[in-house]
Every structure is written in structure tokens, then in C-alpha cells.
Image: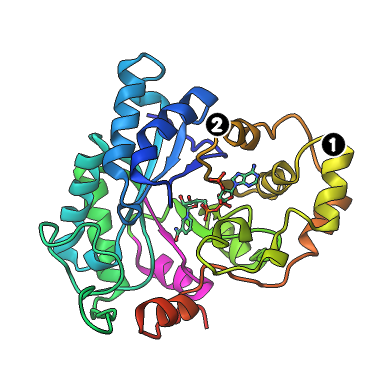
Amino acid sequence: MLETMPRVGFGLWKIPQEDTAASVVEAIRAGYRHFDSAADYGNEVQTGEGIARAISEGLITREDLWVTSKLWNTFHAPEHVELACRKSLEDLQLEQIDLYLIHFPIALEFVPIDKRYPPEWVHDPDAAEPRMHKASVPLHETWAAMEALVDKGLVKRIGVCNYTSGLVHDLMSYAHIKPAMLQIEAHPYLTQEKLIRCAKGYGIDVTAFSPLGAQSYFELDMARKEESLLETAPVMVAAQTHGKTAAQVLLRWGVQRGTAIIPKTTKPDRMRENLAIDDFELSQVEMAAISALNQNRRFNDPGVFTESAFNTFHPIYD
Ligand code: NAP
């Protein structure tokens, strides 16, 4: 298995099931060796099919790949963590997950796998007003169960997503196995300097999700067209200077500031475009100008979408 995580991974959120296996094979052909999966994306079976196909076609071996998956909110209770992990392992057709992350610091009531999978956010989707059902599970209990997965060899490393610095300090106070990764939303409109510095201070690596900013959120009506980073002046000027696309500048900025990035696309041309960011370097002035775009604009905010989409107010950052 890979000892270090490739700095550019392939994001799998919102890739339709019917496109996922082919996208995974295509991404492997394009050179991706790191896949960012999650039970909640609803396409782990197809991700597993794509990986298996690429291995059987001789494109790669399992040892060439880094696969991340995530524990969904309904499986936080210690007795459900291994169940969830084994389901992801089975769906992905893997014997071990390289990195297993707590998806959100949000515990929801358990939903049996044979009742609904992935369980998603609301407990009663058929109700007139479906709502989230919260569960009283302390995060330290979930973490202890995550550590047991490492001890059993089911996962190689563990980490967290969507934690604030307060939760990171707390986690570090009791973790026997240190988190290997903090995965957070980060792009030039949400630079998260203090949180990244906090994680790195503990030796925790950081992965930026939604590295292209608003692009992922237009289809969900969670961003306005004018919030695109691709048309901002410092990004466009740097793109022109280096003969690269605006997307490549955003991704390069993410890697150059020390985060891993996991862009998602279903388009083969963009898969190659998003990987081709090693042949140029942004100057300090360009990096600073892009970072100065920061507005602390969070597109993926449970404090907003849980209420509008799930009739439940559940902020975690405020
Ligand atoms: P993203 O990768 O920043 O953006 C994806 C969007 O940008 C898609 O609409 C894609 O469209 C478009 N795009 C991709 N490459 C492009 C290019 N070169 N030029 C222009 N547009 C481009 O956002 P994301 O999918 O939200 O985040 C990436 C990954 O992070 C996810 O897939 C998931 O694995 C992970 N994630 C994790 C969490 C968490 O809570 N841990 C939350 C969100 C995301 P096309 O597909 O049409 O190309």
C-alpha cells in the first residue's frame, strides 16, 4: 500500500452510480492513484467495480492506490462503527481502507443497513416533513471505535472531516491513535488559515474538499453564479501568466499552500487538466493575491442546509 497520500486525489461525491465505475477507470488511466470515497456518496459499489476492473485490466495493482472512505453520521455509536466500515470494505472490494474518516461531527440515529443504505440525513424520508433524528453519542466514543478498526487491520489510518479547531484540540487530548488527516472545505473564498495551522501544529495532514469553491454547489442551488472563483481577477491573471486554466491555478494554489486536494469531475479532459498542475509554480505575490480573496464563504454548511433541506437546524461551525 502507498505510504504517502498522493496530493491530488479524485473526488467521488455526486458522481452518478451509472457513471462511477467508468469514471474511476478513466481517472486511473489519467494517472489518479488516490480516490476520495464515502458511504454517503451512494456509489461505493460502483467505485469498487471500477477499481477491480482497472486491476484486472492490469492498469494498476491494489498497492498503487490510496482509497479514502468515510463513516456516515448514523453509524457513530461504537457498536455500529465496524459494521459501517465492513460495508464500505465489501462495497469497495478492498481488504483494507487506506484512510477512514469521521464524515461529520454529527451523530444521527442508527438506520439498519438492510432498511436503507446509504441512510442519508433524514430518519423518516416518507414523512410529511422529514427530519434528522439526532443521537447522543460523544465523539470520543466514536473515535475509540475508529481506533479499534486500525487495531484490527481493517483500516490503515483514521482521521476526521469538518472538525473545528476546538474539536481538534479536544480529539488530541484523548486520541491514542493520532488522526492522520483533517478533511475540510478550503478554497480562496474560505482559506481556513488558523484551522490548517492548528492541524499542522499537531502533525495532522490537511485535505481541502471543494477546492474549486462554488463550482460544486451550483447544481445544488447552494451558490450563486457570481460566486465562481474561476472568473476572479487574481486567478485569471495567474492563469494567463502561466498558460494554465483558472481551475489549474486554484488547484495549484491548494497544493502549494500545503493541502492535498480532491477535485471531482466526470469529464475525461478535466481529469487530465486537474492533474496537470506540477509543471508551474505560483509566485509569492500570486499566492498572496489569491489568498486575499478570502471571504470566509462556506458553501457546505450544515447550519444552512440542514434547515432548508432536512427541516432540522443543526449548526456545527457557529
Ligand atoms: P470540486 O471538486 O471543487 O468541484 C467539482 C465541480 O467542479 C463539478 O461541478 C465539476 O463539474 C466542476 N469541475 C471539475 N473540474 C473542473 C475544471 N477543470 N474546470 C471547471 N469546472 C470543473 O468540489 P466537490 O466535488 O464538492 O469536492 C471534491 C471532493 O471532495 C468531493 O467529490 C468529495 O470526494 C469531497 N468532499 C468531501 C466533503 C466532506 O464533508 N468530507 C464534502 C464535500 C466534498 P464536472 O463534473 O461537470 O466536470
Membership of 189 in magenta stretch? no
Q: Which residue is mark 1?
A: 242
Can the viewer see residue 280?
Answer: yes
Instruction: Decide: is 1 above or below 185.
Output: above
Q: Which callout, 1 or 2, points at the residue further toward the start of the chain? A: 1
Of residues 267 and 295, the one drawn nearer to the viewer in this rendering: 267
Instruction: Decide: is 69 above or below 241.
Output: below
Q: Amino acid at mark 2?
A: Pro
Q: Residue at x 69, y 35 (%)?
A: 277
Q: Amino acid at mark 1?
A: His
Q: Seen from this angle, which residue lies furthest top?
A: 58
User: Is residue 313 shown left or right of residue 147?
Assistant: right
Report x, y in % for residue 209.
54, 55
Membership of 173 in magenta stretch? yes
Residue 190 position by quadrant:
bottom right
Q: Residue at x 23, y 41 (%)?
A: 91
Residue 256 position by quadrant:
top right
User: Is residue 303 shown left or right of residue 228?
Assistant: left
Q: Which residue is mark 2?
A: 268
Report x, y in % for residue 245.
75, 40
Label 1 vs label 2: CA separation?
Answer: 22 Å
Quadrant where the N terminus sits is: top left
Which segment is the magenta one?
Answer: 158-175
Q: Which mark is residue 280?
A: none
